[in-house]
């Protein structure tokens, strides 16, 4: 571990290294200096999930620099607490990650006196909406083509539907016959779920810099409950704002978890929905087009449909990607 840390920080500053947080994808550690005052975040990036490490780290550097400039221009107090900063390597300042021959590592500035919220109350939903809307607004000046896709086709509906068709054609476990009613519903809705791609082709829906993982625990708050910044930038890439608003709606406004077997418990919490949308529009509304604003509610349907397509393709393939808690 010392060899890894020494790529970014002088070892004579380092006192302690311990596992940190509860992330499921990357391995995260907190580094503390010898005086127990300064801290840094060390991460081993999961290159199986994010195979395009160079693209990912270039993206986060551009995002970090863009946010820094916007915050400084606005005269924000303590701007260093409002965005993530990834340290360059000591031996090569043009690189902000290190490959040890097997794994990829990076070091990020630690933001002290910060916390995340796991309980999604209407107030937290509003704050999250404001935070993600502001995040997108501050990055709206990044020209299309500057950032790359960290996961190719991650939120591409045509590609997800093709995945499903490929799974149906292979049908390795003979499960397709068991889900014909669901497949009929998928195909019935297909045309309506491809609206954003058609609008983009017609020049009516722009691609923007989006987060692609909009959930309340990806927002940092200070100890008084005020928003500090949006974190977890690994999926920041070009896309449609419907992905961001839709994914929060999909995951956040349901009365029950997405794997709840009792469908009578499933429903839309309109209080959470309204709070998030109002918060989001309060910050993102200044740069959204009328078409984007009109499609916000549709985004929730879109991303719920996309997740259904992904779940169904994985079920047909034999539950290879998503963990299954309940019997078939």
Image (tube, rainbow, N blue to C red):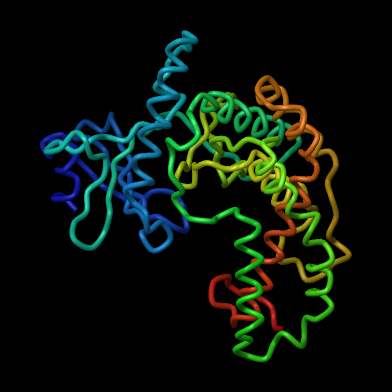
Determine the residue located farthest toward the right in the rendered image: 264
The image shows a total of numbered marks equal to 0
Q: Taking 141 as reference, is 69 left or right? A: left
Residue at 70% from the left image edge and 46% from the top image edge: 196
Please identify the quarter of the rendering in which residue 8 is found: top left
104 up-or-down from 65: above or below:
below
Q: Taking 88 as reference, is 197 left or right? A: right
Please identify the quarter of the rendering in which residue 264 is found: bottom right
Determine the residue located farthest toward the bottom in the rendered image: 174
Give 307 or 14, whichever is nearer the viewer.
307
Please identify the quarter of the rendering in which residue 63 is found: top left
209 up-or-down from 327: above or below:
above
302 up-or-down from 180: above or below:
above
Q: Taking 265 as reference, is 133 left or right? A: left
- Residue 161 is situated, as x and y percent measured from the top left of the image, at 66, 66
Residue at 77% from the left image edge and 27% from the top image edge: 290
Give 60 or 240, whichever is nearer the viewer.
240
Q: Taking 189 as reference, is 165 left or right? A: left
220 up-or-down from 81: above or below:
below
Residue at 78% from the left image edge and 51% from the top image edge: 301
- Residue 20 is situated, as x and y percent measured from the top left of the image, at 38, 48
Q: What is the quadrant of the C terminus in the image?
A: bottom right
- Residue 259 is situated, as x and y percent measured from the top left of the image, at 71, 66
- Residue 14 is situated, as x and y percent measured from the top left of the image, at 18, 39
């Amino acid at each position: 571990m010392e060899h890894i840390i020494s790529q970014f920080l002088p070892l004579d500053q380092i006192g302690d290294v311990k596992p940190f947080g509860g992330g499921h994808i990357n391995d995260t550690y907190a580094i503390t200096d010898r005086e127990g005052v300064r801290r840094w975040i060390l991460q081993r990036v999961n290159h199986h999930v994010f195979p395009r490490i160079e693209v990912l780290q270039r993206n986060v550097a551009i995002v970090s620099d863009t946010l820094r400039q916007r915050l400084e221009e606005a005269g924000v107090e303590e701007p260093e607490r409002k965005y993530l900063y990834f340290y360059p390597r000591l031996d090569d300042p043009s690189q902000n990650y290190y490959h040890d021959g097997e794994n990829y590592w990076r070091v990020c500035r630690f933001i002290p006196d910060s916390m995340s919220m796991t309980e999604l109350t209407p107030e937290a939903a509003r704050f999250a909406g404001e935070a993600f809307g502001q995040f997108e607004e501050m990055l709206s000046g990044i020209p299309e083509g500057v950032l790359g896709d960290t996961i190719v086709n991650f939120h591409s509906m045509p590609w997800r539907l093709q995945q499903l068709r490929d799974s149906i054609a292979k049908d390795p476990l003979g499960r397709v016959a068991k889900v014909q009613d669901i497949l009929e519903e998928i195909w019935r809705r297909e045309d309506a779920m491809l609206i954003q791609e058609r609008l983009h082709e017609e020049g009516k829906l722009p691609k923007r810099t989006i987060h692609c993982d909009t959930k309340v625990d990806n927002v940092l708050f200070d100890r008084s409950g005020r928003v500090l910044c949006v974190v977890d930038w690994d999926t920041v890439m070009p896309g449609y704002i419907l992905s961001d608003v839709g994914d929060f709606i999909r995951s956040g406004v349901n009365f029950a978890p997405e794997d709840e077997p009792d469908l009578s418990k499933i429903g839309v919490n309109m209080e959470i929905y309204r709070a998030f949308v109002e918060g989001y529009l309060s910050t993102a509304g200044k740069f959204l087009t009328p078409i984007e604003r009109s499609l916000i509610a549709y985004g929730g349907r879109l991303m719920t449909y996309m997740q259904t397509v992904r779940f169904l393709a994985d079920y047909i393939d034999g539950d290879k990607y998503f963990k299954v808690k309940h019997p078939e």
